[in-house]
Amino acid sequence: MGKLMPLQKLIDLDELQAIQNSFAGTVGTSSVIFSPEGVPLTRFSNPTGFCSLIQSTDEGKKRCFQCFMEMSRKALKLKESKILYCFAQAGHFVAPIIIDGVHKGTMFSGQFIPQEFSPEQLKDIEKLAGEIKLDPGLLLEKARDMRVVEEDVVWNYSALLCQIVDVLAKLGAQKAGLSRAKDELQKARDELEIRVQERTAELKQKITERKQAEKIVRKERDIAQKYFDISGVMFVVIDADWKVRLINRKGCEILGYREEDIIGKDWFSNFLPERIRDKVMRAFESLTAGDVEPVEYHENPVLTKSGNERVISWHNCILRDEEGRIQGTLGSGEDITGRKQAEEALRESEGKYRSLIDDVLDTSDIGIFILDVEFKVIWINHATEKYFGLKREDVIGKDKRQLIRKRIKNIFEDPETFKQKVFATYDNNTYIENFECHVLPDEEQEEYWLEHWSQPIRSGLYKGGRIEHYSDITRRKQVEIELQKAKQGAESANIAKSEFLANMSHEIRTPMNAVIGFTDMLLDTDLDKDQIDYAKTIRGSGNALLSVINDVLDFSKIEAGEMDFEEIGFDPELLAYDVCELISPRVQPKPIEILCRIGDNLPSQVRGDPGRLRQILTNLIGNATKFTESGEIELALDIEAEKDDQVKLHAAIRDTGIGIPKDKLSTIFSPFQQVDGSTTRKYGGTGLGLSICKKMSEIMRGDVWAESPGPGSTFHFTAWLKKAEDKEVRRFTPVSLTGRKVLIIDDNQTNLDILTHLLELVSMRVVALRNSADVVPTLGNAFQSGDPFDSCILDIQMPGMSGYDVAKQIRNPKSSIINHQSSIQSLPLLALSSLMERNARKCEEAGFNGFLNKPIRREKLYRMLERIIGEREVEGKKDKVKEKIITQYSVREEMKHSVRILLAEDNSVNQKLAKMMLTKAGYQVEVANNGKEAVEKYTASPENFDLIFMDIQMPEMDGLAATREIRKQSSINNQKSTIKKIPIVAMTAHAMKGDRERCIEAGMDDYITKPIKRGLVFEVLEKWVF
Amino acid sequence: MNLRELAENLGLEEDEYLELIGLFVEVGTTDLDKLQSAIDEGNAEDVAKAAHSLKGASGNLGLMEFFQIAKEIEEKGRSGLLEGAAEVTQALKERLKAIAEFAGQ
């Protein structure tokens, strides 16, 4: 310590100063102590005036100081005291103060001269004065005053001072050392004090912090504990010795022990079922050895206190210390016992359910394919195995289409279409319409017919795949096939039935024809009254029988649904008249008047089946005749409604007979019903007629019904008929049949005989053939020999070549046999047919000109022949042979429609009215405005008119006069009497007796009253023209 | 006068009947003129003739009232007593006019 302290610290400077002053005073030198740095530690004691003066100037101070420094340095270097002389020639005792080896300062005891200045010295001083800007004299003065001190003295005294100083210093040093030690001690004590305080504060802080930390930790631990404890998962910490270190509340709960009973116990031997202990222990060992990583998840049971097992799903993790050494495991486990049980139950029930479905599917008859998106089999059932001859195990994963291709024997439809259909639906992922296929599982087994359904699976495990069903429809198919056969059988039975009916009708009619025909022929011979009577009776019975047969055959035809209807044009008015005409003989003995009333709106032509219509009307009127004793029977015909191209015909047959009880009004139309059983006996009849009428009317979309308000009854009949488009008008020229040559063909000899007889009656020449093949050659030969036939009459139903065939052959222009002889080609052909056949159209097509039903009525036959032969006559050879066929109706129709009437009437209104009316009825009308015109028109071309209606009162020439004139003229001109004289009918407003006579006298044939009515006109025409 | 009934009675369509009415009116007018002249001249024969024509036509067409009157006049004509014929003729004329209107003439 002392070493380091500066002098001033070691010695009290005041003391030093005192010492120094004493010394200086004693010695008479000036002393000062400097620090080693040159800093004066003491005040100059006893300074000389000489040095003071030098130091009074700046220069001097500076040089002094410099010199001082130099001297110190020197002294220091010497490390001992020395007397040095400064620049000013003054001597200085320089003594370093060294304490403990350390230079602490420098003492200067100086400013003396050892002797008086020499003159040289004084010169230097003088120079010096100049250098430092002092007055030299002053300085010399001071120099002389300088103390003279012997060196030795200085030396000794200075050394003494030094010693003193030294001692003092040492003392001081000690003192300082002590004091320093004291200070340091104090300082140390202070520091200690501070340190202690600091430490204490620190510790306090630390304690506080630690307390806080502990609190946090505790809190967290509490939370953790809470979680730990509320966890639904059990936590177990097991250490390396297999002991339980930690268990949470859940764990205790699961295991059934209290916590203290678990902690510290061996886990494996206490809490695991025996059977798994070894396994788990081994696993644990590997785990804790670090050999394995913990398994993410595993299930193991634990053993509870009560001896039960709970299944736990574990997750284990390894616990390591700071050095990474394995300390044990933490396992977290969830009690999945419940879940496991549920799973088990589910599996079981699923299994049960599954096997139920499997059973159902497997026992089902429906073959099922479950296919994936590529048509590979996912599953099939037993039925599929059976149908396709497959085994489930073999086909899983295989392409179904390949598998069954061979098995499908035939597809119900064309295979290409089937394929396309199928694949189209696969593409569209839609349903396949069911189709049927014929499957053969393998060659030996029986075949199946299956119905195939396919639908896409839209969701779930097999989405995109398909479920295909095959139902066994073998039975159904068999039934279908059987049904088909049965149907065919029924159809052929039906056909057989129809053929039977047709045959029957032919077989029955033919002899009937003979009976009736021959009876007629018999009546033509000379018979006595009785014979005539008997013959008539036979004929009547024959007709009755025929009508019964017709009824029966008609009825069975209707029942068989075989009733067919003709469609040809006819005149309904004519038909009605025909029926009435037919009926008249039947009422002969009884006082009954037959009336026919034609509605004015009845068209002259309609299209339908005139035969059937006639049949119905005849039946209804026939009934009327049967049940009426006296009075009248009226047939009224009119149009009830009109629609598009059709008209509804309405016929009402009114009689004044016995009437029908109200309750029977509908039953009489049922088959086999008559009003009562006694009716049959009294009145005869099969009871079929009305039901047949009803059925036929229904076919014509009409109806038949009866009213009986009394007395008598009215039967109504309606039917829809088509309107006729055109009305062909033919010119009817009556021609004589005498001498005409006719060829007749029928396979039945009887028919031939009858026909021959009829024709010979009118003086025709008849050639009869039985073989249709002979027809054409016969015609040819006759032609060749110059005596051709005028007409040919053919039976239609003939074996071998039928009538149609013959007709076609004759009409065929290419027929080589005919040899292009158009006269043969255009030969008038007449067809004869059994009533059952509706053949008119067919005959027309075959090329016949005329058509008649058997049995034939002779008048009809004659008219027909006249017509068809006459037609050809008038118009010469025709190339065109395709004409509308003439039926028995059409003959009359055409006659009617070709009737040309000359109407002579002066009143234009009346004329117009009459013309309208007559034209509407189908007649051709020409008018004359007065008698003169009438005569002129007629005589100009008499053959053009069939009848003249002559008004009586006309200007110029009245009707009577005109008639007379006409009669006169015709008697002049007329040679041939084949043309009858023209009927002239008067039109008068009144029919007084006198008028009638006058008309007859004038040459008129008849009269009608004005205003003229259609029905009357017809009557007249019928009378005089037809 | 029911057009449909009248037409139906004759078995004609309504338009056909109307045509006839038209003609009747035309001719009837002429006849009426003839009748009038005949009455004016006092020619009973001509009166009967004209009336007869009118009678016939109207009767045919079912115009019965007209018919009756015409018949009356005809009888007058035939009997030669033309008294009151003029008035009746007037009635006939009016009748005809009514018929003409009815037919839309």
Image (tube, rainbow, N blue to C red):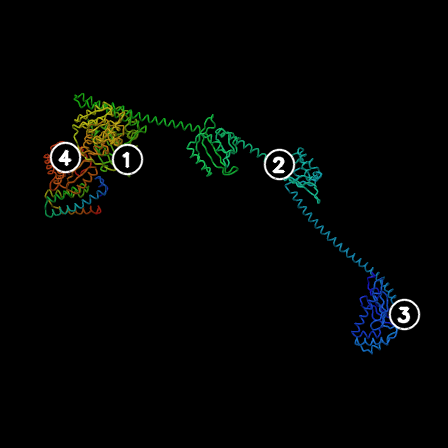
Amino acid under label 3? Answer: Asp
Residues at marks 2 and 4 on the same chain: yes
Find the distance from the CA under tag 3 to the CA under tag 4.
227 Å
Question: Mark 4 — residue?
Answer: A982
Observer-side mark, 3 or 4, equals 3
| Mark 3 touches mark 4? (CB < 8 Å) | no
Picture coordinates of residue A454 (x, y %)? Answer: 47, 35
| Mark 1 touches mark 4? (CB < 8 Å) | no
In terms of depth relative to the viewer, which is nearer, A734 or A572? A734
Question: Mark 2 — residue?
Answer: A337
What residue is drawn where x is 80% and y is 66%?
A37
Task: Left or right? Give the position of A117 relative to A652.
Answer: right
Q: Is residue A170 above or below residue A62?
A: above
Q: Which chain hosts label 2? A: A
Badge 1: few (under 14), some or many (20 or more) residues near its Cα, within 10 Å?
many
The quarter of the picture where the N terminus of chain A appears is bottom right
Task: Left or right? Give the position of A414 relative to A221.
Answer: left
Amino acid under label 4? Answer: Ile
Q: Is residue B57 above or below residue A473?
A: below
Occupied quadrant, residue A971: top left
In terms of depth relative to the viewer, which is nearer, A791 or A474? A791
Q: Which structural element holds mark 4?
A: loop
Question: Mark 1 — residue?
Answer: A720
Look at the image and tell me whether residue A710 can be seen: no
Picture coordinates of residue A655 (x, y %)? Answer: 23, 31
Q: Which chain hosts label 4? A: A
Question: Mark 3 — residue?
Answer: A152
